[in-house]
Structure formats: structure tokens, C-alpha cells
Amino acid sequence: MSLHMASSNKMNLETCSLYIYMTRRLKLLFIGLCLGITGFLVVWIYFGSKEVKQPPTSILLQHFAKLYNSRNFSTPPADVQLEITSENPESNLRSFYSGIGISSESYSSLQQEIYWAEPDRPITDVSMSTSAAHSTFIIQNLKDSYQIGEELFVTIHARDFNNESKRYGGDYFQAKLFSSENPPKASVFGEVEDLLNGSYSVRFLLPWVGQAQVAVRLIHSSEGVQVLKHHRDTDSDRIYFLGYFEGPGPDGNRYTETVKCNVKWDRNGLERMGTGDCCCDYKDPRNGEEWRCERPNSLPCSAHIYHSMGGYYNRVTDKEAMFMSETNKYINGQTTPINILPSNETVRIDVTQKCRPGLRSPVPAGFYLDDVWESFVCSTRHFTAGTIAQCLKDKHIYLMGDSSLRQWFDFLLEAEPTLKWMNNHVEYQAGPLIAVDVENNIDLHWRSHGLPLRFVKTQVTNIHYICNQIDDLTGGSHTFIVFNLGPHFTTYPLEYFTRRVMRVRKAVLDMLQRAPDTTFIIKTVNTGYKDVFGSDWYSLQLDRIIRWAFKDVNVYILDVWQMTSCHYNEEDIHPGPVIIKNEIDILLSFICPE
């Protein structure tokens, strides 16, 4: 028995020793394997990183590889693919957009919407940029006469200051067809397509009988657009705001302090304000929008009472200013009058369908004839005093946006005597504003879209975000909500604007869920600005984001972009009464369709 136990103990001891030996060998083998893999990875990363840093063979690949660093949200053509890895900045963008409810598929479609071509070579001298004086346009296959309803095609050839043909796209042209006398005050917007080779194609519809001429403007050269991109990407703080703090100081006396404020966005130059204890941060508890002011010396952050526009930082260099000098200039081309005759067939230019949400704006969306906008979207009416009140009877009209939408409030107030403005004892330019017609049970409201706002000094408590305003309304068949976003956002990164738009979109969808018979109309941006603080090119990018965000929502997008760009009046971000009257007619035609 004892011999058996001794033998058994010896066997267990040998087994244990063998186990320990094998365990140690396996540990050494595992450590060696790890070191080997680590060494391989170090070598691979080292040489792999050197290979990645080599210039790609394609200029387009080179451009899109630096997509995030340049903050350019252009999308490559379909044949250019980006590998999405944790080290690729593109993945950071996708992650950002995913965080605001945009799927990978929607993200790709958004990039296509805002794609804009860039120069395919380094621009070392201003003489290489597009010259309006040397660029020309020609009418393709010009005929002695056309019939109403036909299309006219024009080709633009961009040339540089050396009179050499440009070989890449990215210039921003606007085109219109117009007639001054026969017929009078007629014009229509032309759709410009970038052929990406220095040439551009323009398509016009011929919507009237008489004569017409083509006019083409170089709004910005492709090189000028790069200046705009650069400043949007690097100094979004070039417009700043003021915050006014008031309250009792430490000694009991009442203090007033004024500091700089801006959007809280810790990149694109906005991080220059500082972080941490430098500032007072204000986060809207309902939608998450953030605003930041420098911390006052004596007063607490809670003493922020007023807001106003502050000023500008012009960081444009002398060379950049030369690139921007070719701005809003007409180019030379064929001035031969285009003769438009009645059609031999039955051609209807007018539209009979009733105005309703969900309709899409074609290009062109309409045309001017004797200063009256003839819509291609739906059958519009022309309203006067009396008929305006009849249309608005028993309705709640909410206008939410900037000062161009406040023009609508002002126009209706002047055009309809029964509407009476109620003095809220606020700064009129900043609002909020309200007008009522007690007899006809009409209430008309205008309120700004929320920060950022380039307005006069106004109380912070009167500044509300659009999404919050919509959430606070009941909605219903008597409620009509009109909003716009644009010029006050031109200096900020596209991600910031997209996030704001998506929050408004959610509020609209929530309203249509609880009150589906509520009517929404979105007013697009006016043309007018042409500088680094508010260019039409900036506005065009914002306009495309709004159209993309609401393309599948039951709203109507009122295309004032075309209405302001093709009219004969000098462009102004606040257009004249003729244009406003036509915009109001379209608005009221949706409120009161025939």
C-alpha cells in the first residue's frame, strides 16, 4: 500500500514537472511570436506609411485623400474609391454625420450634391486664373428662329489671363436669358453644367414669344472658389459677435461688460477663442446647439443679457485678393438676338396644377414676363389688398428666418391694411414681430432663426432656434410655417450647417407626425453676396444641403434663388419690391390654391 502510494506520488511529481516545463516553453514561444508579429507590423507600418505618403498617380485621388484636412466636402467621381480606415479622415466625417442621423448611403449622396471641382495643378501665379475678359460663350447651332418651348444650348469657354484655354473646371458662372423690350422685362434662369475641362454647358428654355439675348457672368473663378474654401475651412471666426453682460459686481455696484462671442466649434479657427475657464458656454438643453462667449472679468456667465453683431476679421492676403478680383463680371459672347416664334403645335407654357406641398422645383422654375413671375411649378395667383386678407382669413402664419424673410412680413403689413402691427417693445430688426387682423382672425409672426445672427443689439431671451419654435406649435390645417436658413451661416463649416438643418428637419417630421395637415414652405437663399464673408458660392452650397435634407419630406421649397439671379434689378441680398411681390404671390398661392 505504501509502495503504491510512493509510486503514485512520484508519477504525479513527474507529471507536474512536465506540465511546468511545457507551460514555460509555450510562454516563451508565445512571447517570441508576439515580438515577431510586432516587429513585422512596425516594419510594415514604416514602409507602408512611406508608401502612402507618396503622391498618388491621379490628381483627383490626391485631392480626395486630403478631403478632411482641407474641409472640402467634394465627392470623387464614381471611379475614384477611398479606403475608409481608422486613419483615414474620411471615416471621421462619416462618424460625425452618422452621429446626427445620416446613414452611409445618405452621406454619399450629400457629398455628390455639394461636389465642386478644383484646379488639377498648383496655381503659382494669378495669370493662371480665369479671366472674365478673355472667357467667352457661343450659342450652339444658332438658328434664324426658334419656337416657344424649344431649348437653347450655350457653351462657355473659360480662359486665363494669358488667353490660354482652361483645362479644368470649378469656375462659378451664372447665366440668364433676357429681353428688355420685346417682350418687356422678361428673363429666365439658365442651368450651368461644369464639363470639368474648362468648358461649361448652359441650357435655356425659350418660354416667351419675341426676342431674347444671353448673358453670362463669372461670379468666381475656380481659383477664387479655392480662396473661399480656404477661409471657410481655416477662419470661421472671421465674423464675430458681441455678448453684453449686466448685473451687480462684487462691490454691489451695477456693471456692464461686453465680450466677443461665437459658435462653439473647436476647429476651423473657432477654437481661437479658447477652451476651459476662458469662456462661458451656453448649450440649448432641447437641441444641443452651443454658443460661447469670452468670460467677463467681474460678472457671472448667467449675466448674459444682450447679443449683437460684432465685426469682421479680414484675413485675405494680397494674392488671394487678386484671385477674388475676378468676381461678378460679365463675359463676352454672341449678342445676336434670338427670335422666338409661336409654336406650330399646341405648346402650353402655363401650368394648371394646384400649388401644394411636395411639389418639386424644376430648372427653370419659372420666368419673368413684364415683371410678373410665371411659375412652372403650379398655378399661381396674383394678390392685392383685400384678396390677401381673404386668403389669410382664419390662419396662423409663422415666418422663421433671417431679414430676407422679414421682408415678407413687411410687405404683407404694407399691402394689406387690415393687418395691424403690434408693438412688442423690441428692436424691430431683430424681432420677434407680430401683426393681427382681429376681424378676419389672422395672426402673422416673424422671428429670427436663432444664433448665429448678424443683427443689432437684442435681448438673448428673444432669440429662439427654429427647431424649438416648431416644437412649441400645435400645428394643424390653419397653420402655415415658412422658414429659411442661409446668409448668417456662410462663414461656418458645412458640418455645422448640416447639423442645424437636420435638427430642423426632425422638428418638421415630428410636426407632420402629430399634425399632418400643417403646411411647410422653405424659402431658399437670395443671390447677392459676392465676397469672402457671404458669397453666392457659399450660399449655393448651403442651398444644396437644404434641398438634399428635405427632398423626401412633404414640404415645398420656394426657389427664390432663380428669381433673384435672373431679374434685371441689381442683385441685393434684400431684393426690391417687384421681386418680393412675386415671392408673396407664390406663398399665398400655396396657402390659397386655386
Image (cartoon, helix red, strand yellow):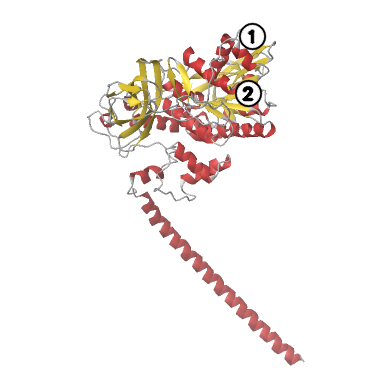
- Secondary structure under tag 1 reads strand
Left or right side of 87 for 296: right
Q: Quadrant of residue 392?
A: top right
Q: Residue 420 carries which label?
A: 1
Q: Residue 581 carries which label?
A: none
Where residue 23 appears, x then y in whole percent?
Answer: 59, 74
Could you tell which of marks 2 and 1 lies nearer the N-terminus? 1
Where residue 496 appears, x then y in whole percent?
Answer: 53, 33
Three-letter amino acid code at the position of disc 1:
Lys
Write down the residue under mark 2: 480
Q: Nearer the viewer, residue 524 or 585?
A: 585
Q: Quadrant of residue 172?
A: top left
Judge whether residue 461 can be spotted in this image. Answer: yes
- Secondary structure under tag 2 reads strand
Q: How crowded is the residue under tag 1: few (<14 C-alpha within 10 Å), some, or many (20+)? A: some
Instruction: Name the residue rendered at 52%, 42% in the picture.
Output: 106
Judge whether residue 214 can be spotted in this image. Answer: no
In this rendering, which labeled residue sits more in front, label 2 or label 1?
A: 2
Three-letter amino acid code at the position of disc 2:
Phe
CA–CA distance between discs 2 and 1?
Answer: 19 Å
